[in-house]
Amino acid sequence: MANALVAASSGWTAQTVVELRDFLDALTSAADQVDVERVIREVNEDREIAGFPMVTSMDVAAESLRDRRQAWRRAVMATFERVPTVEMAEAMFTLVDKVADEQRFPRFLHEVIDDYAVRSQSFLAREIAGAERLVEKARELAATRPDALPPIIDALKKLLVTWDELTHPVQISATLRGQRDEESEKLAFTVRSLSIDLYNDHSLLEESQQVSVLVGSSFSALPRVASKIAEDAQALDNLSAQAAQEDAELAYAADVGTFSKTRLSIDRDGVEWRGRRTRLSAIRGVRWGAIRKSVNGVPTGTDYLIAWNDGVATTTAEFRNGAIFEAFVPRLWQGVGFRLMNEMMAALGAGGELTFGKMVVRNETVVLTQRKMFSSERVEFGWGDVTVRTADGSFIVEGPKGSKASETMGYREIDNIHFFEALVRQAFKNGRVRLSEAFA
């Protein structure tokens, strides 16, 4: 039957994917039904009738059968050469799924898949190189332009879908034989590393999940990959649930004003006032404060101010509703404050300096203004030699006793002074003389 199918296929071109699949199914099934002992028995029966010596060597018969199997494999490859690559890939894809569903997988089909994999090597090498370029581009954009990632992820998706369509038979065959499809694993773990980096290095949870799903859907037949992706998916799901809870805690909106309402809001995407929206990640400075007012000693209310800037423009929200102020400020801490504190520590730890009003801040020292009778000068002190306090809506840093050196920074006027104060107080609490080690 195998010989007959191969003979019939000589010069034949399959007209449809189904025709090609059915030919491969018939040939691989027939090849697997060949029993060398039965072949010898039947050949010897004919030889005995014809008066020829009987074949007694099993090795001779096995070698002859190996030669025939090689001829059948060459015939399959010749048949593949006569059809478009996409039809060849689809026929192999559907055949592998068909025999797997029927819980049979001819040994000869494994051999055909080995030849098929060799034929695909040049394509696979190009795809791996293309994937590596996309991954590197995605890493670059994640650091500077995360909004430009969707086209890169779409390109990765198309590449992985094509890869899966072509290598699915190779993946299934390798798994069933307890082997590894090294090219597919290499590609899978290359793309998986991008998923990990998107979250670990850039906190891009949604994009990380998208990439992880791509890997999982394209390499589900590979046990090592499937196991890692399952672990990743669980971890990302947990992070997503945590992020959703944090988003819910962060989100807040209120209408300010009695007659003419103005919306003040904050959520994971940004802060909004008077229709102007600023992304949280773009905010470089924040300040807030309150001033109590009175007339002839009679309290007339409190003016509240919250302001933020993105390095280009400043948005200032002023109102008189204390409840809104008390609800909004903690959310600014959550959405912006911790990031800016970390950036302060990183900058100081790298040898940089910060300026708040006239005060110059370094990792181990601070420069204050020392006042004299008719002049003043700038003096540098170690953090272990100064004290801090709050008075009249300002944060005050004072030099050693008797130095007459200090700086006063109003909470309503100086960007990020609230966050810096928290950093300094944490350093003092932990006995640190380097601000970069405040939380160590």
Image (cartoon, rainbow, N blue to C red):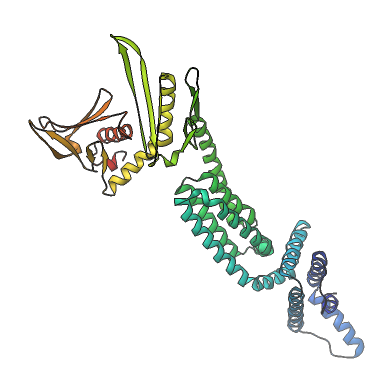
Residue shown at 32%/17% (left/top)?
Answer: 292
**Could you tell whether 249 is left or right of 428 in the image?**
right
Vertical placement of residue 231 versus 28, above or below: above
Q: In this orientation, which residue lies closer to the viewer: 259 or 233?
A: 259
Q: In this orientation, which residue lies closer to the viewer: 436 or 329?
A: 329
Residue shown at 56%/51% (left/top)?
Answer: 150
Q: In this orientation, which residue lies closer to the viewer: 135 or 301?
A: 301
Is residue 219 at all visible to an observer of this figure? no
Residue 94, position in %: x, y?
76, 61
Residue 291, position in %: x, y?
32, 20
Residue shown at 43%/27% (left/top)?
Answer: 328
Image quadrant in which the N terminus is located: bottom right
Residue lying furthest front in this view? 260
Is residue 222 at all visible to an observer of this figure? yes
Q: Quadrant of residue 241?
A: top right
Vertical placement of residue 280 versus 128, above or below: above
Q: Quadrant of residue 169?
A: bottom right
**Could you tell whether 330 is left or right of 131 in the image?**
left
**Could you tell whether 306 is left or right of 107 in the image?**
left
**Could you tell whether 25 is left or right of 114 in the image?**
right
Q: In this orientation, which residue lies closer to the viewer: 112 or 122?
A: 122
Image quadrant in which the C terminus is located: top left
Residue 143, position in %: x, y?
44, 51
Q: Quadrant of residue 103?
A: bottom right
Residue 63, position in %: x, y?
73, 82
